[in-house]
Image (tube, rainbow, N blue to C red):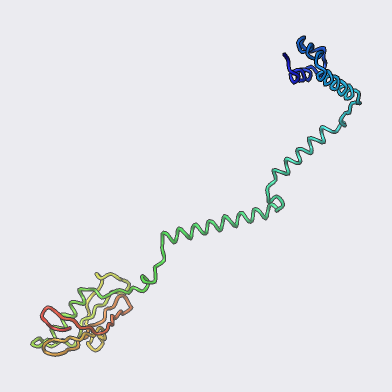
Amino acid sequence: MVSCSTIRRQLEAVEYDPEALLPESAAHLMACADCRAYAAQMQSLRALLSGQPRVLPPATFDAELRLRLGRDAHRFREPFLAWVPTPVLAAVALAVVVTSALAVRSSLQMVLHPAPTVAAALVLPTLPERTLVTALSRQLDGSLPGSRPAPARAAVAVARPGRMTPAAVRQTSLPAREANGVVVLWRGRSGERVLRLPPVVYGAQPIVDRRPSTEGESSDDSIF
């Protein structure tokens, strides 16, 4: 048996024309008062709509509609800074590119040539160990009891101008009174003696290592 909802869907499919229904649906429509009333109501509504005059669009409707749709689409595609003049944008872009290039160049220079630290900048050339040992041995040989007296001229290490390598250091003789260098207090079994070591010159700048006096014990139980 066909339901009422099925009959109404079939009526919508045939535009509410009962004569276009199947025989089984037509028999149900004849037996069901609700379905007949629905079909009559839909037929009267269709006749009312068809009796209305046909409304035609204006001749320029299609052109105006296309123009409005194109204008709306262009407005939505505009960038956020569309109101800024093009020369201003070009100048800003050029400034950004130049600043970025300078920043990258500065970073590369810092990586390839790092600036010296404060500790490295304060480091001064130290007295070569061999020269210090030689000068100290000569002073000790001339100051200890039973040794020969120290010569009147002290040996001073002087570097050739413009060279900073230890290999360029040569020995020259200066008066002992001008060798105002390191002062060492030697305390041995025979008493105390003051030893004066000459300064060392690197290039054109003399570097004198001045340190406070210290005491210590050597292998032969002497204090220095």
Task: Residue 203 in the image: state x and y as whole percent.
Answer: 31, 75
Vertically, is 194 above or below 133?
below
Which of 43 and 122 lies nearest the eye of the viewer?
43
Vertically, is 202 above or below 82?
below
Which of 198 and 57 lies nearest the eye of the viewer?
57
Task: Residue 62 in the image: state x and y as whole percent.
Answer: 82, 32
Based on the displayed image, in which of its 4 quarters is residue 157 positioned? bottom left
In this rendering, would 105 be left or right of 180? Answer: right
In this rendering, would 198 be left or right of 107? Answer: left
Based on the displayed image, in which of its 4 quarters is residue 188 positioned? bottom left
How many numbered circles are shown? 0
Task: Residue 34 in the image: state x and y as whole percent.
Answer: 81, 20
Based on the displayed image, in which of its 4 quarters is residue 96 positioned? bottom right
Which of 178 and 146 lies nearest the eye of the viewer?
146
Vertically, is 86 above or below 66?
below
The N terminus, quarter of image: top right
Vertically, is 105 above or below 174?
above
Task: Residue 79 in the image: state x and y as whole percent.
Answer: 68, 47
